[in-house]
Image (spheres, helix red, strand yellow):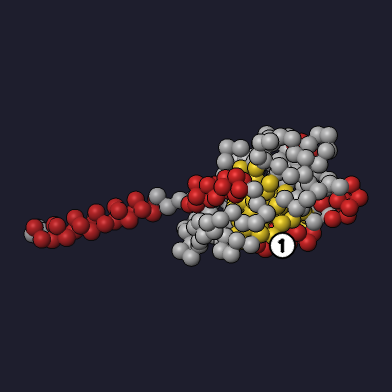
Amino acid sequence: MSLNRREMLRLGAAGAGGLLLSSAALSNPLPVSSFARPPAPLDPLAPVNAVPRVPTGLNPALFARAKAALDSHGRYIRHRDVIGIVDFSSGSGVPRFHLVDLMSGQVESHAVAHGRGSDPGHSGYLDHFSNQPGSAASSNGTYITADTYQGKYGTSMKVCGLDWSNNNAESRAIVIHNAWYAEPEMIAQHGKLGRSEGCFAFSRASQWRVMSRLNNGRMIYADKLSA
């Protein structure tokens, strides 16, 4: 059977389309875990740099670092209305985990424990950070929140580290959870909280508040300013 030029062009175009379709099908990415998720699409309603001044109660230098981290990792952080800033320059006996509303500038603060590896003498103050597995230390840097799960301390929330200083957070099982040693009674009795294995450990009431405000891939920035 002979084909005229028009029919040959039509069949050639159809064949090329089939090759393109096959190539696209083969290039589809494989499913990824909750921690290895691809960059989230940006929320068009998410405020960026919505608060020009430093909110009351925050260290200006630490707030500046947190805002820089928010801009630097913006492609991974979908919701930017509320962020968490942890000031490990302060002792565990004072509220140092700050929920910052970038729309209104309001700050809500909670006490949080640090890792025992960061405070071997249990002074109540974080001495150093570590990202090493088995260190039982807190890590500094930028985190995003991930899924909740049922663990040793009940409902807990996973976090993922985005910086070289905390990128082992998943393998180290660094999470947000509540703990008996992070309840207000510990501060009343000892002037400080107990120590975690590197997790963000809160009282039960604070944990639920933090998880409800920072869920769905919101950012936490943790650091300590030099004296």
The quarter in which the N terminus is drawn is: bottom left
Kindly indicate the quadrant of the structure image that contains residue 136.
top right
What residue is at 64 percent from the left and 54 percent from the top? 84
Q: Residue at x 65, y 45 (%)?
A: 222
224 or 165, nearer to the observer: 224
Please state which of residues 10 and 70 is positioned toward the viewer in this rendering: 70
Label 1's element? helix
Residue 160 in the image: state x and y as whole percent.
Answer: 61, 48
Q: Where does residue 142 sit, x and y in percent of width and height? A: 59, 46
The residue positioned 10% from the left and 61% from the top of the image is: 6
In terms of depth relative to the viewer, which is nearer, 44 or 149?
44
The percent coordinates of residue 44 (x first, y second) are 46, 63
Taking the image as drawn, is residue 38 in sight?
no
Q: Is residue 163 visible?
A: yes
Q: Which residue is mark 1?
A: 209
Quarter of the image where one finds residue 127: top right
Location of the C terminus (image quadrant): top right
Drawn side of residue 12 relative to residue 77, left or right: left
